[in-house]
Image (spheres, grey):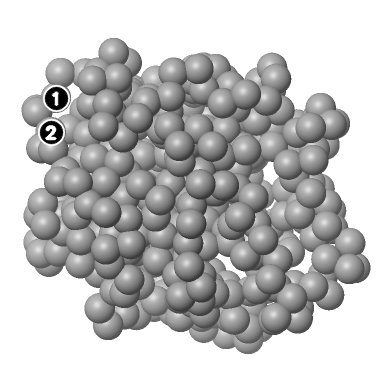
């Protein structure tokens, strides 16, 4: 999920002050800062849940992984890489991908390490999940597919991964869509106590630091129950059905899922030291580098992790062409709850 540091910096716990409705998105967003790019096409409205499955998944060896991914759209179209979060999988983009494909984009949706059909190539590879390791997975994915530059768009872990690549390897990023804004983890700030209500939102992070949390994650049925419960908390208006959860829950049955999730959250709060192989990247990220690529940031208004201030708490981190939107009535899993809005953000970022 998002960065506790960024969220706890904000004063209070309300959502953004200028939430826009789905129907009013274009008009409300036009008031924010942007450069004079070409006019972006309008994404046609789509009812969430229209699509339920991707076509046959593909695989590519990239770095330490064999990455499973979905692909849609023309092979030679401009590339968009969509990055999911926790506890989610590629189905968060099952409606977004065809919308973008119909506009001529080549859409790639990889499973992150520890999820779905992505596998480590060697049983000896440490099941590391610090932020730079996941970002390097996506750089390796792009290299393996000979993709020089792409629009990166994500939420949760996916936002963090896209932010990192945009900050450290901006030459690989044509444009960025980052749900919840700037979410690169600052581990030193993570060690500072936040307001009680903020800490309450992060209950699972502390739970994962305990033996009980570890045992829950290592038990498949208990892990699935926990993930489903998180869905209900962070997307209070999303009336997903059993089949929708079941499709995504298959990705949580990965043999390395517990190890990856526990490592990620324990690492963030300093219970695990950084792997020396990633030290040079983590030192750069600890400085909270600015992001200069064209960016659209999205705040889901009903997400409990959306800080107040309509994006003001992180605005200064983005130095290039920029748009911000707060999306009314939508929770944490924004691309699956509001696929048209998310797809429009991708198109608009590409045209900044």
180 on left or right of 10: left
- 264 left or right of 56 in image: right
Q: Is residue 330 above or below residue 121?
A: above
Q: Residue at x 83, y 75 (%)?
A: 215
Residue 146 in view, yes or no: no
Label 1 Cα crowd, 10 Å radius (few <14 / some 14-19 / many 20+): few
Give residue 329's mark.
none
Label 1 or label 2, whichever lies nearer to me, is 2
Left or right of 3 on screen, residue 321:
left
Q: Please tell me which residue is depicted at 75% across the width and 45% down the height of the picture.
A: 202
Residue toward you, 127 or 323: 323
Residue 257: percent from the left, percent from the top?
Answer: 63, 74
Task: Please report the residue visible at 55 percent of the width from the left and 48 percent of the height from the top.
Answer: 235
Total label count?
A: 2
Percent position (x, y) of residue 37?
Answer: 14, 24
Depth check: 141 or 294 in front? Answer: 294
Looking at the rendered structure, the secondary structure element under dot 2 is: loop
Q: Are marks 1 and 2 in contact (CB under 8 Å)?
A: yes
- Residue at 72%, 55% in the rendered image: 265
Q: Which residue is mark 2?
A: 40
Which quadrant, please, contains the C terminus? top left
Q: Which element type, helix, strand or loop, lies under badge 1? A: loop
- Extreme residue toward the right, this view: 211
Front in this rendered view, residue 335 or 279? 335
Is 88 rendered above or below residue 164?
below
Residue furthest bottom in the image: 123
Residue 186 in the image: x percent, y percent? 68, 36
Mark 1 and mark 2: span between their CA atoms? 8 Å
Q: Which residue is mark 1?
A: 37
Other residues around mark 2 within 10 Å, as few (<14) / some (14–19) / many (≥20):
some
Q: At which x and y percent is residue 225?
A: 69, 71
């Amino acid at each position: 999920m998002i960065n506790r540091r960024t969220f706890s910096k904000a004063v209070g716990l309300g959502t953004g002050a200028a939430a826009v409705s789905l129907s009013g998105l274009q008009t409300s967003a036009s008031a924010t800062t942007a450069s004079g790019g070409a006019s972006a096409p309008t994404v046609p409205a789509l009812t969430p849940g229209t699509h339920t499955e991707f076509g046959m998944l593909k695989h590519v060896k990239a770095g330490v992984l064999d990455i499973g991914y979905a692909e849609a759209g023309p092979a030679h179209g401009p590339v968009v890489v969509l990055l999911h979060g926790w506890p989610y999988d590629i189905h968060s983009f099952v409606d977004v991908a065809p919308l973008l494909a119909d506009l001529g984009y080549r859409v790639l949706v990889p499973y992150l390490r520890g999820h779905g059909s992505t596998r480590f190539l060697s049983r000896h590879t440490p099941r590391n999940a610090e932020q730079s390791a996941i970002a390097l997975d996506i750089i390796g994915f792009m290299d393996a597919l000979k993709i020089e530059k792409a629009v990166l768009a994500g939420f949760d872990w996916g936002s963090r991964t896209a932010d990192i690549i945009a900050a450290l390897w901006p030459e690989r990023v044509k444009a960025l869509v980052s749900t919840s804004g700037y979410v690169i983890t600052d581990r030193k700030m993570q060690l500072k106590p936040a307001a009680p209500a903020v800490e309450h939102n992060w209950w699972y992070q502390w739970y994962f630091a305990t033996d009980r949390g570890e045992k829950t994650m290592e038990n498949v049925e208990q892990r699935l129950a926990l993930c489903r419960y998180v869905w209900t908390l962070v997307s209070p208006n999303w009336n997903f059905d059993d089949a929708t959860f079941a499709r995504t829950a298959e990705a949580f049955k990965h043999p390395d899922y517990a190890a990856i999730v526990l490592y990620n959250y324990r690492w963030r709060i300093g219970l695990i030291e950084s792997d020396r192989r990633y030290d040079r990247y983590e030192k750069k990220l600890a400085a909270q580098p600015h992001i200069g690529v064209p960016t659209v940031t999205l705040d889901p208004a009903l997400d409990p992790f959306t800080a107040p201030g309509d994006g003001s708490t992180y605005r200064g981190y983005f130095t290039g062409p920029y748009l911000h939107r707060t999306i009314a009535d939508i929770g944490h899993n924004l691309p699956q709850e509001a696929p048209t809005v998310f797809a429009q953000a991708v198109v608009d970022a590409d045209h900044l």
